[in-house]
Amino acid sequence: MTILGIETSCDETSAAIVSKSPKDTKVKVISNIVASSLALHAKTGGIVPERAAREQVKLIIPVIKKALEDSNLYLPSSKNHLLSSTIYRPNIDAIAVTVGPGLIGSLLVGIETAKVLAYAWKKPIIPVNHLVGHIYANFVGKTQKLTTDIQFPALSLIVSGGHTDLVLIKNHGNTKLLGGTRDDAAGEAFDKIGRLLGLPYPGGPAIEKASERGDASRFTFPRPMIYSKDFDFSFSGLKSAVSRHVILNKVKNPGDPSALPQDDIDRSNLCASVQQAIIDVLVSKTLNAAQKYKAKSILLGGGVAANQSLREKLKVKCQMLNVEFFAPPKNLCTDNGAMIASAAFFNYQEVPWRNLTANPELYFLV
Ligand code: KG4
Ligand code: ZN
């Protein structure tokens, strides 16, 4: 079976062709095209939803076409017309598309395109929760290995720009939200603190890079809610603490390229200390939840899952607890169509194209 996955919930425009044979327990990515409008958002220091959606309107058809071409599903006879159903209908079985959570304008670009293609090509549509997509990036196999060692119950930590969630997965299609952030998400904290320190958007990768030269024990920042018994998170206090530190210590123009070397050392130390504070909270809460719910596997997901220190620390702690640790390859941590198609294989629920709607507030069942 082959599925076209479409993802446009935030600033990326992505399409992927993914296949799975009945005997395999992982999916195979045939093509995965991601067009990012990051450069555009770097100028404004964050995403302007209207601009993101306009960019996606321009990108969506070329991106889908490229995904089909790269998988050899695009026929030369189709004369560049994705929609001429009489002469071109790709050899796929279904279309999976992100229906939420996300930015309404961005979601609609993917959803309306999926509807039109489903109608023209006479293919079923499978709506996918973006957060479930992040979990299922862990079910993408390496070329030669399409069976998985992921055992249930599994616990997933989803850390992205909009979410920090701990989700218990009893089986495919059977998930329960254990906790989430009460204010800023982990990625949002990275992005906002990055901006405070004058780093380029997105802050996560920039803070990770600057941290490499820094001393994480140089500054002690709060680890919000680390000892609370629940599985909720809160990161806005950490952002305020860094802001206070910057003001009190007169770290002037922290991102000024003409700053003295001393300023740069301080910034690296600040970044390393902030990164450590965020990771400490994420790891501690995840392990507590894994123990309480006797998880056999831990599945990391979301853009922040690309952070090497987070991956390493969780892996080491999981080994100590005898729990299997999984994290997607880094290119599948941030938003992409392959994870959406992967989620569709394991949560296959067709809907008539007429019934497909965007749900920007979509979440997990508690
Ligand atoms: O999952 P994603 O691509 O989009 C959302 O669904 O939000 O996540 C984007 C987030 C951003 O906040 C970005 O700063 C963060 O992921 N991020 C990272 C890293 N790479 C991306 N955070 C920390 N370290 C990274 N290496
Ligand atoms: Zn995401």
Image (spheres, rainbow, N blue to C red):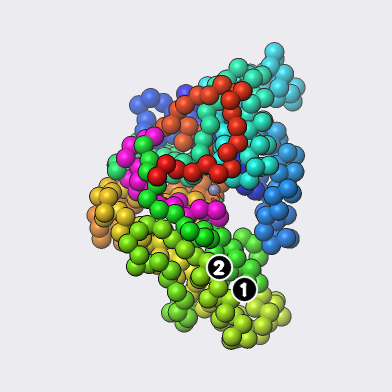
Q: Give the class, few, some or many, for how many residues have Cα within 10 Å of label 1's Cα (few <14, many ≥20).
A: many
Q: Is residue 89 magenta?
A: no
- Establish whether ligand 1 lies closer than 8 Å to the Cβ of label 2: yes
Q: Magenta span covers which residues?
A: 154-173
Give the image location of residue 281, x and y in percent: 40, 65
Query: What's under tag 2, amino acid-wise?
Result: Ile
Q: Which residue is mark 1?
A: 197
- Establish whether ligand 1 lies closer than 8 Å to the Cβ of label 1: no
Give the image location of residue 50, x and y in percent: 73, 48
Q: Residue, x 44% and y 61% (percent of image)?
A: 233
Report the front residue among 345 and 235.
235
- Give the quarter of the image for residue 113: top right
Q: Give the alpha-carbon distance from disc 2 to disc 1, as whole Å.
A: 9 Å
Give the image location of residue 285, x and y in percent: 36, 60
Circle 2 sits in a helix, a strand or a loop, which is it? Answer: helix
Q: Which residue is mark 2?
A: 207
Q: Is residue 101 visible?
A: no
